[in-house]
């Protein structure tokens, strides 16, 4: 299986004579976005060259771009063979197993001396249509050596024809077949495209420099012959369009002659919103831009000549920075969780100590008293001065557990008692309170006399609940019932409001009942219980 890596950040490089052109592209919200274009004069360079290659801005180095991006370079067209192939297999999954064997007859060199890849064109029944892309292994090795001299180690090696196909698919749309003509200094590449797929490619060993050398006619004739040859690849199908890329500044006259002679329309790439470059710049950077676009995530028609023993040796190198950032983020997150956990545990320990102090208060055991008793029975390993006690903040969880166990044993050893003497208002206390109540006494201060006086007719004092041997948890509860009469309902209502209002006798937590019948009123209420009960530990 051929390794065809992809990435959301790619760097396409193309070496044309002594000029290294590069394009950096990234995926932003699913769309390719142009980040950087540059060219560097790399003459002279050699294996002993150690200085970094700087962009034209003088600050950005090529090395910094190589570290962050998937690097793609391109084999020249004269080093690559492009052929069409049909393979009949019932299952498309079997295609990989027979591809190398079926393609070998198309090669002018032994199969083990070359590197093959393919582009899937389509499938009709059991027949798969493919475009075979092949190169001699030694040419790929020479290309990698040439890149190494520039301190560039590409992860993917594609070819000019595939890069131009990808570039055209982004910047040109055609329902009919067309030919891409790409001009470089020393050669010209012609690529036949049909339905957005690479069909054939040929290279003319004459480039734009022929114009300077007064060999324009040689260049024109060679391109015309190549276009005729490519036209025969699609039998009976007219190829009316030419898509022009590369350095076309000096060959405009030749292009117009070819267009007129062959009756073909010339087209050029147009800028897009996310890749906004002038047409001339788009043409010049067509190959590195196509190489970078082809290696973006989601592209299906990828070609990679780095196979077998020429596989990229450092597949994780590009991810080291991200792995480092991911590891640092994980460590930071773990440390933050650790701090949060320690903070939460500290809060929990403080809450336990608060509950511990509250427990001592509920059993009427001061903290210092318990510490002295505990220290007397279990001497501390830390020497303390006389009367000194360990602070609550210094106690550990084990210290608290030991003291709770000590307190539990002490409480279990304490007799289980209950109060036999109630501390609730007696009958005399109730009568005294009533006799002085401003809503009951008359204007002369005498019970039952005066215009607004309340006539008490009966009083019942009942103890409803009390602790017993079998009910030690019970509390004292006394209920008082009064029956009285008054001259006006207003006085009765005011007395009822006084019973509900906070006072020293009536238990505000108990229910105050009230009823009236023909000027006679009945009310009942509970008295406050001030009895001291032994503290009980939650069981």
Image (cartoon, helix red, strand yellow):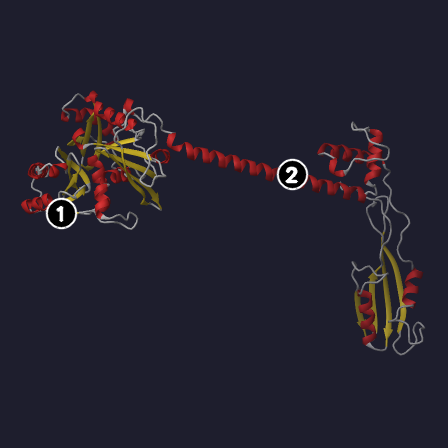
Q: Residue at x 89, y 79 (%)?
A: 451
Q: Quadrant of the C terminus?
A: top right
| Picture quadrant where residue 21 is located | top left
Q: Is residue 173 visible?
A: yes
Quadrant containing the N terminus is top left
Mark 1 or 2: the one toward you: 1
Residue drawn at (16%, 47%) of the image: 267
Looking at the picture, tell me which residue is in the foreground, 118 or 446. Answer: 118
- CA separation, marks 1 and 2? 75 Å
Residue, disc 2: 345
Nearest the camera: 508 or 49?
49
Residue depicted at 60% across the width and 40% down the height: 340
Label drawn at residue 211: none
The location of residue 82, given as percent across then percent down, is: 16, 32
Question: Where is mark 1, residue-wise?
Answer: 266
Q: Using the rendered view, name the quadrant where residue 462 is placed.
A: bottom right
Contact check, label 1 and label 2, Cβ < 8 Å: no
Q: Nearer the viewer, residue 60 or 277?
A: 60
* Mark 1 or 2, nearer chain start: 1
Which residue in the rendered view is the most extreme toward the bottom? Answer: 451
* Direction from residue 444 to residue 207 in the image, left or right: left
Residue 177, image quadrant: top left
Left or right position of 85 against 12: left
Residue 86 image point, x, y percent: 16, 32
């Amino acid at each position: 299986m051929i390794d065809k890596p992809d990435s959301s950040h790619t760097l396409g490089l193309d070496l044309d004579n002594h000029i290294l052109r590069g394009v950096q592209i990234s995926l932003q919200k699913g769309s390719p976005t142009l980040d950087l274009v540059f060219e560097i004069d790399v003459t002279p360079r050699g294996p002993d060259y150690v200085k970094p290659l700087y962009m034209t801005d003088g600050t950005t180095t090529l090395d910094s771009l190589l570290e962050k991006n998937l690097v793609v370079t391109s084999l020249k067209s004269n080093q690559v063979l492009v052929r069409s192939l049909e393979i009949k297999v019932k299952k498309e999954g079997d295609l990989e197993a027979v591809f190398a064997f079926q393609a070998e007859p198309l090669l002018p060199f032994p199969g083990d001396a070359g590197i093959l890849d393919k582009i899937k064109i389509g499938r009709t029944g059991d027949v798969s249509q493919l475009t075979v892309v092949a190169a001699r292994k030694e040419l790929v090795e020479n290309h990698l050596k040439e890149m190494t001299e520039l301190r560039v180690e590409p992860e993917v090696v594609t070819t000019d024809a595939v890069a131009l196909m990808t570039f055209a698919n982004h910047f040109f749309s055609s329902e009919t077949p067309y030919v891409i003509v790409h001009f470089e200094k020393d050669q010209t590449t012609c690529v036949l495209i049909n339905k957005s797929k690479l069909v054939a490619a040929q290279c003319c060993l004459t480039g734009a420099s022929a114009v300077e050398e007064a060999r324009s006619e040689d260049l024109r004739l060679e391109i015309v012959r190549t276009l005729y040859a490519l036209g025969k690849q699609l039998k009976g199908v007219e190829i009316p369009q030419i898509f022009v890329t590369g350095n076309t500044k000096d060959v405009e006259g030749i292009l117009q002659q070819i267009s007129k002679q062959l009756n073909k329309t010339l087209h050029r790439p147009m800028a897009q919103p996310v890749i906004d470059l002038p047409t001339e710049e788009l043409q010049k950077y067509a190959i590195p831009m196509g190489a970078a676009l082809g290696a973006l995530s989601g592209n299906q028609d990828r070609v990679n000549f780095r196979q077998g023993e020429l596989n990229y040796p450092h597949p994780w190198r590009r991810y080291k920075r991200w792995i480092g950032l991911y590891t640092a983020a994980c460590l930071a997150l773990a440390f933050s969780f650790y701090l949060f956990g320690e903070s939460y545990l500290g809060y929990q320990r403080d809450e336990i100590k608060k509950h511990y102090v509250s427990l001592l208060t509920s059993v009427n055991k001061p903290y210092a008293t318990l510490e002295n008793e505990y220290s007397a029975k279990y001497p501390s390993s830390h020497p303390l001065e006389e009367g000194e006690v360990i602070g609550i903040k210094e106690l550990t969880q084990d210290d608290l557990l030991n003291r709770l166990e000590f307190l539990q044993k002490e409480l279990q050893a304490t007799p289980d008692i209950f109060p036999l003497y109630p501390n609730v208002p007696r009958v005399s206390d109730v009568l005294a309170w009533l006799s002085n109540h401003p809503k009951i006494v008359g204007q002369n201060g005498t019970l039952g006399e005066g215009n607004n006086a309340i006539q008490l007719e009966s009083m019942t004092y009942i103890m409803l609940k009390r602790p017993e041997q079998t009910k030690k948890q019970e509390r004292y509860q006394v209920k008082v019932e009064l029956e009285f009469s008054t001259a006006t309902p207003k006085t009765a209502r005011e007395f009822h409001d006084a019973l509900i209002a906070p006072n020293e006798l009536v238990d505000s937590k108990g229910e105050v009942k009230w009823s009236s019948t023909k000027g006679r009123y009945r009310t009942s209420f509970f008295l406050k219980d001030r009895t001291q009960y032994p503290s009980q530990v939650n069981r």
